Every structure is written in structure tokens, then in C-alpha cells.
Image (tube, helix red, strand yellow):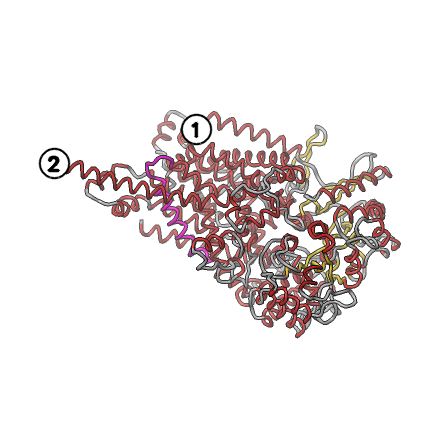
Amino acid sequence: MTAVTVSRQDRTEHQQRRRRRIFSYVAMGIFAVVFLFPLVFMFVSSLKPDGQILSDVRSLRAFLPVGDISLDNYVGVFDRVPVARFMFNSVLVTTLIVGLGLVVNSMCGFALSRLEWKGRGVVLAVIIATLIVPFETIAIPMVYWVSKLPTLVFEGAVPKYDFGWLNTYQVQIIPFIANAFSIFLFTQYFSTIPKSLDEAARIDGAGWFTIYRKIVVPLAGPAFATVAILTFLPAWNSYLWPLMVVQEESLRPVMVGMQYFFQLNTAWGEVMAYTSLITLPVLIVFLSFQRAFVSSVAASGVKG
Amino acid sequence: MKRRSLVTIVSVSAASALALSACGQAGQGDGGSGDGPQELTMWTHSAGNPAELEVYSKIIDEFNASQDKYTVVEESFPQGAYNDAIVAAAAAGDLPCLLDMDGPIVPNWAWAEYIQPLGLPTSITDNLLPTAVGTYQDEIYAAGYWDAALSIFARKSVLDANGIRIPTIDQPWTIDEFDAALTTLKAAGYDTPLDIGAEDKGEWWSYAYSPMLQSAGGDLIDRDTMLTADGALNGPEAVTFFTWFQDAFANGWASNSGTIGNQEFNDDVVALSYTGVWNAMDSLEAVGDDLLILPPPDFGDGPKIGGGSWQWGISSSCDAADGAREYLEFSFQDKYIAEFSDKQVVIPATAAAEELSANFGEGDPLRPFVELSQAYALARPATPAYPVISSTFEKAAKDIMSGSDVQSTLDGAVQEIDTNIKSNDGYGF
Amino acid sequence: MAAPAAVLLGLFLIVPVLLAFALSFTNARLISPNPPRFVGLDNFVRAFTQDPVFLRSVLNTFLFAIVVVPVQAGLGLLLAVLVNQKLRGVTFFRIVYFIPVVTSIVVVSILWKFMYQPTGLINSFIDTVTFGALQGADWLNNPSTALPAIIVLSIWQAVGFHMLIWLSGLQTIPDELYEAARMDGADAWAQFKNVTWPGLRSTMIFVLVTITIAALGLFVQIDVMTQGGPQDSTTTIVYHAVRKGYREQETGYGAAISLIFFVLVLVIALVQRFVTREKD
């Protein structure tokens, strides 16, 4: 008798779990469709001629690679825009912003979370306050400002000073290395690493930099991965700034290239093809880092 | 992330940053050192437009080869971002020698001392279409190779089938006729018979709809004084026009969305399309002989179309202005003007180039645009206040389109424009 | 060790911000042959007394934030709970939900503008699902639907990021707590209420603060899709500041609007901080 009840109980529990699983899959599936359809639309449209994109948008055909399918738009994109050059610039600028940003911001986070120094509280407060400033509102003073900054130029092999950062790679990189949000994340994460480790190292005669490099950094992988992805996205997508400060075509990043397609009449097919092209690297980066990223955000357990 | 890989990334980044900041330093400096030819920098708004760029590089190559004092170096920007780039460069004191600009912005840049008087011989500027020359305070600051024109595209078969009279330059549609035609066409099954282009944004709004306002007797500003919009933009004539404009959407004659361009007309989804010469080739291909290029309707003061397209000027900071003039003089040859016209499908700025061009000579299929331009073209007001006027006009027209009260919206726009003019001490007027 | 970051932040954030603040007390113009004049508080007086569009922008910005903050946080949590189950293929779904986040907001805005057209995808979908009983609106051209339409798009784009943050919070809650709750006979809802939610407190604060800051800075979607219209129903503070300060060239006035914005957000941030600290 008992055995029968147990198995029945098991069965209902099993059924319940199954029902819940089915429900979960249905819900997740619906959400997946909702989140994917604009991108499917983008990619599918990149294979169609303009006229067809506009007429297909009224029906489900918008999501299906039907009708006059070709790679013509991609050919058109390469005719119109120096894609490879723009990609190279974006990769370069983005890599440097992310790479240098990791170092600079983690060091700052280290100082804020572990060192006792005067004015620490003020600096932290200022940094948090700067999170609020939207870039659009300071863009103009910023252009004026960077155009007055000194820089090193080489005439032949002779270095000399000059003024004005316009039209360089550095103007696209250096202003964005220090990042209040990254500092904030590092500070939060570092403060979860036990301070007793530092003290032990101090007794062994280690300096602060050694503690940073040998103790804190190796334990903070997740924070580094999180900051890397979060600084990668705005750097790759930057548009307004390079537009204002870079005049030479050979220095432009990918997002500026978007504007090339909005002539008197928009070449929609090429817009879709170009957006597919420039979204692709981001997806690849994200897909290859996603395991580390997802688990790192999880591990960092961002504490507010 | 492992420590070693981090250290590697950092050192590589730092090293490449140094190297690149050194070699990426390519200034806009005009002067070259040494005895070689002097460099003339030149910016165009034509990035992403290979056909137009092709003509420019041809002119530049031929100019550079024709003499050895100057070398013109061209840099192109996407149109949507061009003004931002110019303004940023001006703020930083880094303007090129030669730059092109949209006609209505010329007075603003002249007033701001971005550009200097053009100083081309009158033998060149007198031959150009009046709307291809940019002036401020009676001084010429810019000149262009072409102009564009708007018209109403239609199919002859459709008008005939619905018993609608085909208008001519001498006898355009009156506004009542136009309304009746739209009503008929809507009844004939066109959901929104007129593609008026309201889905676009930016300068298109002033370019396309302020001529209609002028045709009704209103204007963007009082052109006699250039000091107030009062009476021009909010007088009874303006209210009449904007009421019509609002009704056109409310009655379902025109749609406030759709897609920029002329696809709907080519697909026969709309019967009439208020659009520009730049769309004519595609429509000619799609519609063939059936295509009609018609004058816009007469709102009372005769039809008007907007004039003034991209023009060339010389920056005030240019230290080789003579060279820049030499280049411009060289470039205003009829063969080049005709080539721009062919590649861009725009109206050539000289009569001789019209004949050389493939599409705009006597008897050519796009000839009607030349006639429309000659009969009706009116430049937008030549005042430095124009950017504010245009932005305010666009906002007011859009609000009216979506149903806001006509008179009070226009009064608000006038107040905004007048405040701005006052705070700029009248912009030199 | 904070020096490099502090110097960079000082040079490229603090200095431009201070410059902008200084400009807000002048009649500086983007393009003008006349030098800027000091005008005291004129710009601020103008914003609050003579510029109805500015007041409307403040209202819209807060409306947007008031809807987006809870909805985006809630939806993010729901998604996080869904993909936190031990099911086959959840990683796939996590990635899919995150994809809009990695897509440029400019690209996303262009795509959605396309879909919101009267004859676009959204309306043909509504038509199909309701068998023609319901007619979709002209979303972006109707003053009462434009802001909601932008809210939907914005949540769609950003929710994946907050899902991930919630997920990280969920994964720090030890399994033993759930097992204990199950032993006590707690159903799914009771488990969520008594175990999950209390464990997510610190995550919640982080999520709320980041969404609030992002929501108050709403700009790109407006710029691409509606330019503040129809009838000012979607104009926001940042959009208005850019329109005035840049497009209409009144740099001084635009800077004043930015300064007001900065103060407003700072106040909100302080209030949020105060409220959450008190409860701790």
C-alpha cells in the first residue's frame, strides 16, 4: 500500500515538474522570439532589394529569406564605405579603451577600496556623481577643450610639441579610458576581497603595487570580465564623438559609416547589410566571452 | 582573466597607443613646408556617394595637373553628419580652405565669419542660376554647380482615367482643383493618394513645405527687415495654408509615415508624389512615358518651389585663398557642371551645361525641371537666423500635422524665432 | 594609484563639465561673431518661466523613468528566474535575451521605427492575432502612443542587461536555503517570497540605480525616431538640451538645461541612496 502511494506521489510530483518545465520552455520560447525578431528582420532584409524590403514589411515575409535574395547589398556596402578600414579603426580604438581602461580603473578601484588616504570619500562621491553626466551635454565644451591640448608629434624622427588633438586616434581613446562606472564596479568587487590578505603581505614587506598585482588582481577575474564587456559596447558604438573630432576618413570608426547610407534616399538594403556587418563582431565577441561573462557577473554578485 | 594575459594586453596596448598617437597625427594644416606646391584642403558632404565623388576627384586631378603652385586634397563626410563636423572644426579653429554647404546655411556661416566673400569673377557667377549663388548682405559668399527642384510626379494614364486636368506651368492646378483631384483619387482606391514626404525629417521640411506657405502668401520671416516672423509665419495666409496642411492628413489625402523616397509612387501605391528631381530617373525607369512632371499647386500667389542646393565657399582662415579661388574658377567649367548633372541627376547651373547634360537639355526627359525651376524657384530667406527658423518651422509643422491648434502653434513659433533674433542683436540686419 | 584615473577623469569629464557650467551663465552661442556675455541667471529663469517645451521635457523624462524603472526591473527579474532554472538550453536563452543589449541603440531605433509604421510589422501582427478586431495605432505620430512606443522599445533593448545582473544575484543564493524551504512545504511563490527576494536586496539597489540613471538620460531613441514630437509628447531633458544648445546653436541656454538636469539627477540619486540606506 505504502509503495503505491509513494509512487503516485512521485508521479504527481513528476507531472508537476514536467508541467512546470513545459511552461518554462513555452515562456522562454516566446521571449526568445520577441527578442530575436528585429534582428532576424535586419539580417533577412540585408539580402533583399530596397523595394521588396518596403513591401515585405507588411507581412511575415519580412522574416523570411524569400523573393529576390542576393548578396548585392553587401557588394554595395563595400563600394560605398571603406568597411575594412573602419573595422580596423574600431577594433583598435575599442581594444585600447578596454585594455587601458582595465588597468587604470582597477588601480583606482584598488586605491579607493583598500588604501586609507585623505579625500578618499570626496573622490568616491565625485566619481559617482559623474556617472550622471550624459555625454551629449558636454560634447561641445569637450571638442573645444581637446582642440587646445598639447600633443607630441614627430617630424621625421624629431619629437616636438604641438597643440590640438583633433583628427587622431588618441582623441578617440584617451578621454574614454577612465570610466566612473568601471571604477565603481572595481571598488565594489575589491572590497569583498578580505583585507587580511593585504595585512599578511604587508608583514612580508610587500608594497601596495605588489599587493594589487599579486593578490587583488588574480582574485578579481570576474570583475575584469564584466568591466571588459561593459566598456566594449559603448566604445564600439561610439558615434557622436568621432563625428565631431575626426575629419579624416581613414581614422573613422564603424558607426560613423552608418551615415554614408542616408543620402537623399536611404539605401535600406545596404543599411541592413552594413548594420548586420558591424553587429557581427560584437556578437562574436559576446558569444566567445559569454560563458566567462555570465558566470563572472554571477560570481561578482554585484553589490549595490 | 589570468594575470599574465592582462599584463600582455596592457603593455601591447600602451605601446601601440604611443606609436599610433604619433603616426595618427595628421593635421589639417594648410601650408606645406619646403618648396613643393601648397596644399589646399577641401571638404565635401559627399561620402557614401561614389558618383559625385568621382567627378570631384576628376576635377581635382585635372586641376592639380594643370599647375604646380597648389595641390588640392579632398576629404569627404557623410551628409547627415557634415554640419556637425564643420561646426566642431570651426570651434576648434580647424576649418579647411574649401568647403561646400547647403544653400540656406550660407548667411549663417558668413555672419559667423566661417567663410569669406567668394571673390569669383562676375563672368562666372552671373551665368549661374540665381538660386545657385549664396549671398549675405548683398555679398556673394558661395556658388554651386547645380540646383535641385521639386515637382509633382504623376501617371498620365491615372489622371486621364479619373478625368483630372493635366496642369501646365502657365496654368497650374488651383488649390481647389488640387483638393478635388485628391478627393477623386482617394475615391478611386488610393488609400493616401499623395506622397508628400512627411516621414522625412530635418531640412526637408522647410525645403518642401515653406514654398507652399509662400505660395499661399505667407513666409518664414518678413524678408524686408529679416527681423521678425510676425505676420509672415502666423498671419491669416499662413493659417490658411497650415489648415490645409493639417486637413490633408486628417482627410487621408497624405500619409504622415511611409518610407523616404519614391518607392510608393513607383509601385503605384500613391497616385501623386511631391518629390525631387533626384528621384526622377528611377521613376522614369519604372513608369516610362506615362510619367508626368507637374508643377506644384497654386495656393494663391502662384506655385513656388524651393531653390538653393549645395554650394562652395572659402573659409576665412584659409591662408591660400587665392589658390582656392583659382581652383573654384577652374572647376566652374560647363563640362564639369554637366557631368555633376549627369551623375547626380540635378539641374546644371549654367545654360551651356544644360545643353551638354544628358537629361536637361531642350527636349530631354527631365527638361520640365529646368522650366519649373526658372518659373518658380525661390530661395529660403538669406538670414543667419535660418537654422533656428528651419528647426522651429519643422517642429511647428509637425505639431500641426498631428493635430495641434494652428494659430497658437504658429504664434508660439513666431515668438521663438523673434526671441532668438533679438538675442542675437538682429543678426547684423 | 588612483592618480591616472583621477587625472583622466579630471581632464575629460570634470573640466568639460565645469566649462559647460560656466557657459550656462552666459549667452554663448555655437556660431557667432559676437563674444559671449555674462547674463547671470537669465537662462535658468527662461527655462522655468518662458519655455513650455522644457517643462514638458522634464515631465516626459520623469514619466519615462517612472514606467521604465519598475517594469524593466520586474521583467528583468522574471527573465532571470526563468533562465536560472536547471534546464537544458538555458544558456541559449540567456544569450538570446542579451543580444539586443549588444546591438547598437541607433540600429535598434531604426529597426523599430520601421516596425512602428501604420502598415508595419507591429500593426500587421495585431491585426493577425485579433483577426482584424483591433486596429493598431499610428504609434509614433500619435501624441498619446508615441512615448509608450518608445518605452516598449527601450525596455526591449535594455532588459537583457538587467536580467544578467539579477541572475548574478540569484546565483549567490545558496541552494540549501531552497531545499530547507521545500522541506517546510513552501510552494514556488512562497520560496520566491521568503528566500529569493530577501537574498536579492543588494542586487535590487544596483539594478534600480543603473536603470534610473540610464532612463533619465534618454536621448538616442528620441533623436532617431520622433525628434521630440508629435506635439512635444516625447521630448526629454537631454534631447531638449541638445536641440537648443546644438541644433539651434544656443550653447549657453543648452548648458543651463544640462546643469538643471545634473542637479535634478543628483537629487534623485541622493534620495535613492538615502532611502535604501535607511532600510538597511
Question: Where residue A155 sits: x, y (%)?
Answer: 72, 32
Question: Where residue C61 sits: x, y (%)?
Answer: 48, 57
Magenta includes B21? no
The numbered disc on residue A207 is 1
Q: Where B214 sits versus A232, above or below?
A: below
Q: CA distance from mark 1 to mark 2?
A: 68 Å
Question: Where residue A245 sits: x, y (%)?
Answer: 64, 44
Q: Chain of mark 1?
A: A
- Residue nearest the viewer, comparing A30 with C179: A30
The numbered disc on residue A2 is 2
Amino acid found under the numbered disc labelled 1: Gly
Q: Locate residue C172 relative to residue A269 in the image: left or right.
A: left
Write the start and end of the magenta stretch as one range.
Answer: C61-89
Residue A114 appears in the rendering: no
Q: Locate residue B21 relative to residue A220 in the image: left or right.
A: right
- Residue nearest the viewer, comparing A133 with B82: B82
Mark with earlier residue (1, 2): 2
User: In which quadrant will I find the N terminus of chain A?
Assistant: top left
Question: Residue at position x 30%, y 42% from top?
Answer: A20
Question: Where residue C267 sits: x, y (%)?
Answer: 44, 56
Specify whether disc 1 shares its chain with disc 2: yes
